[in-house]
Amino acid sequence: MALSEVQHSGWSVRRVDSVGGDDTVRHVDELSEDELSAFLAGVNGGSMGTVPLDDGDVIVFTDYFRVERD
């Protein structure tokens, strides 16, 4: 599965090519255990459940990924 866009439970994780100056950018190593679990579940196509991340957060992993509420 390509890591481009995954949607589950009202949230999506979408690969983005760039980020804006106003975006909140966090490295995957900065995430709490709950945030990391939800993010990785979304990237891997699983259910993200209750997402402890903020709408619009950009996570730096293998690429930039934006977490969005649908």
Image (spheres, rainbow, N blue to C red):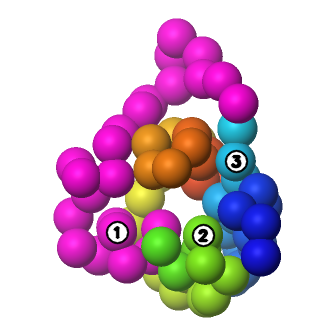
Residue occupying image coordinates x 45% and y 50%: 61
Examine the structure image and report whether residue 25 is included in the region drawn in magenta.
yes
Q: Secondary structure at mark 3?
A: strand
Q: Quadrant of the N terminus?
A: bottom right
User: Would you name the residue on which mark 3 appears?
Assistant: 15
Residue 57 visible in image: no
Residue occupying image coordinates x 60% and y 16%: 20
Per the rendered image, the range of residues in magenta is 17-39
Left or right of 35, for residue 62? right
- Labelled pair 2, 3 in contact (Cβ < 8 Å): no
Q: Which mark is residue 43?
A: 2
Cα distance in 3D space between marks 3 and 1: 16 Å
Q: Earlier in the sequence, mark 2 or mark 1?
A: 1
Q: Secondary structure at mark 2?
A: helix
Q: Which mark is residue 18?
A: none
Q: Secondary structure at mark 1?
A: helix
User: Would you name the residue on which mark 1 appears?
Assistant: 36
Residue type at mark 1: give it: Leu
Q: Residues within 10 Å of mark 2 (few under 14, many from 20)?
A: many
